[in-house]
Amino acid sequence: MARTINYVMLLGLQRYSQSFFAQAEAEVRKELPNFRLRIFEDADVQTRTTEVDAAIAEADAVITSLITLAETAELLVPMVERHQPQVVLSYEGLPEMMRLTKLGGYGFKGSGMPKPVQNVARLLVGGREEDAFYGYVKLQKITGKLINFLPGKRLNDFRNWTNLSSYWNHRSVANAANMFKLMLREYGGHKKLHVDPPVEMPTMGFAHPNSPKLFARPDEYEKWEKQQAKAAGKVSKNGKSYLGTVAVLSFRSHILSGTTYHNDVVRALEAANLRVLPIFVMGIESHVVVREWLSHMAVDLVINTMGFPLVGGPAGSTKAGLTTNVARDLLGKLDVPYIVAQPLFVQDVEHWRENGVGPLQSTILYSLPEMDGAVAPVVLGGMQGGDIVTVPDRIKRLASIAEHFVTLRRTPNQAKKLAIVVYDYPPGQGNTATAALLDVPASLIALLDKLKAAGYNVGEYPRDPATLARCISGSIKAEALETQNLASLPPGHPPINLPNVDRNAFYTWVRPGDQERITDRWGAFPGDIAPLGAIGCGWAGCNSAMSTSACSR
């Protein structure tokens, strides 16, 4: 009876790939029935430490991916070093994890791209600093092709590592199975095992749920798009049968691994009568897509389902401070709304419902993108077992936000409604429209001037900052409002329409937890501050021709 061949895989941010790699294991076992692949999540290292340690002790090879938590690495690194598996492959993780890589005589000892490699990578992308990692991907692709033509046994281990990385990066069940078989042939003694070369896939391109293939270029996708529209009897894209065009950026590895949230987003947007450009990237070239594709494709909105900064993505940037400046420049030139909305890749849906977004994901998925200019984030779902799932009402919410942003973009400025909110806390203490080292009334006049020049209907407003300040800070006594005594309003003041928010409505709108927080801070409903709604401008100098939107608070 043949000895069992044990491979161990530990997945961090790629825990969603468990079923994918299980399929690859099944393919290998068709030829080697004694092959076994044990898959653990990074959390198992802490919660099932003894079991993980025992598995590594028996392992012929260990593969880790996206181990990014220091507390996990602190346990895992000593395990691997203690048991010394014959082969260790560590992809896209902490430097201490990457340094575990061992393939015969080859090992990864660095903490990043060596300087000469960085220089060559920059040459491949025209010297752009922000494209350095994208250039490194191109360099790897070139190296992967050349290395197989170079003679010499001394290069065997490096050649094998390069080929294994190619299988890993071009994610498919067949490629993953052949990755395992190459390891078994070169380091497991199965010399007669047939291994197919990796089937390459574009590093960035278009992936529509209705298409059986990926498209590497915009013209390929648009040609297919026209064919689909013609076959369905729909008006072509030039016929303006849709509200507008939305670009959706998603992780390439997620799409290749068979996750479905990208498809859910695309279909929901299309159901809202939006044309969708469903784009996949590895993560480090999102800004390249914006610069080289979207700038020529007349988009009305960009939705990023990955989080992370636009420049550098999960890899960060090779130069401090570069990320945000380049992103703002690119997005500013594109001049469309930019939304970051994604599932929580490491948090279960139920945990999210009970506790909200965890601090790590909040930083990666929301805070960093906000520095680029991202707005209106939506949590689309999260983990459920080993799969990424979406929540229907969250998908519907994203589609609604996208529909309204596109509609707003195509609405003439004169027809748009804006509200300007100024600081007033604590109320009644002379803090209205104040800010440290900023002349708020003068800034408001400058803002209103800009809006007027852009075609917005802002009405008439005082040109003098002091006069505008008195206009904003004017108020009507709460007693007069409560009795609807409009006769007490200043002469010429426009009528005030007070919203009728009763107690039942308040408690219906506000969740119990929020009710408790509001009551603790402000007291019981309706409270003492503007209990019946917004207070109209109380300055007698306001006349009936003055815009209430520009002179009320």
Image: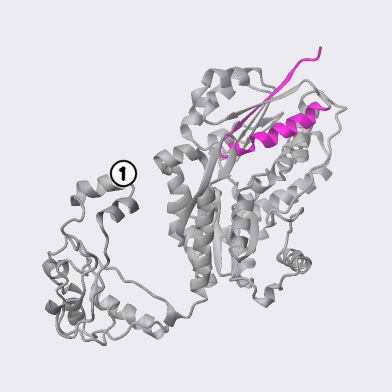
Q: Indicate the colouring scheme.
A: one colour
Kindly indicate the quadrant of the structure image that contains residue 61: top right
Query: Is disc 1 surrounded by few (<14), some (14 to 19) or many (20+) residues within 10 Å?
Result: few
Whether residue 2 is situated above or below residue 469 in the rendered picture? above
Residue 20, magenta (yes or no): yes
Q: Which residue is labeled 1 in the image?
A: 513
- What is the x, y in percent for residue 339? 50, 60
Residue that lies at the very extreme toward the top in this rendered image: 1
Quadrant in the picture for the N terminus:
top right
Instruction: Kindly identify the residue that appears in the image at 81 percent across and 28 percent down.
Output: 185
Please give left or right for residue 536 compared with residue 89 in the image.
Answer: left
Whether residue 201 is situated above or below residue 333 in the rendered picture? above
Please give left or right for residue 489 compared with residue 97 in the image.
Answer: left
Quadrant in the picture for the C terminus:
bottom left
- What is the x, y in percent for residue 11? 59, 34
- Residue 316 visible (yes or no): no
- What is the x, y in percent for residue 62? 65, 27
Instruction: Kindly identify the residue that appears in the image at 51 percent across and 51 percent down.
Output: 393
Residue 102, magenta (yes or no): no
Kindly indicate the quadrant of the structure image that contains residue 281: bottom right
Question: 154 or 490: which is nearer to us?
Answer: 490
Question: 260 or 440: which is nearer to us?
Answer: 260
The amino acid type of the residue labelled 1 equals Gly
Dot 1 falls on a residue whose secondary structure is: helix
Question: 454 or 82: which is nearer to us?
Answer: 454
Residue stretch in magenta = 1-30
- Residue 31 visible (yes or no): yes
- What is the x, y in percent for residue 229? 74, 67
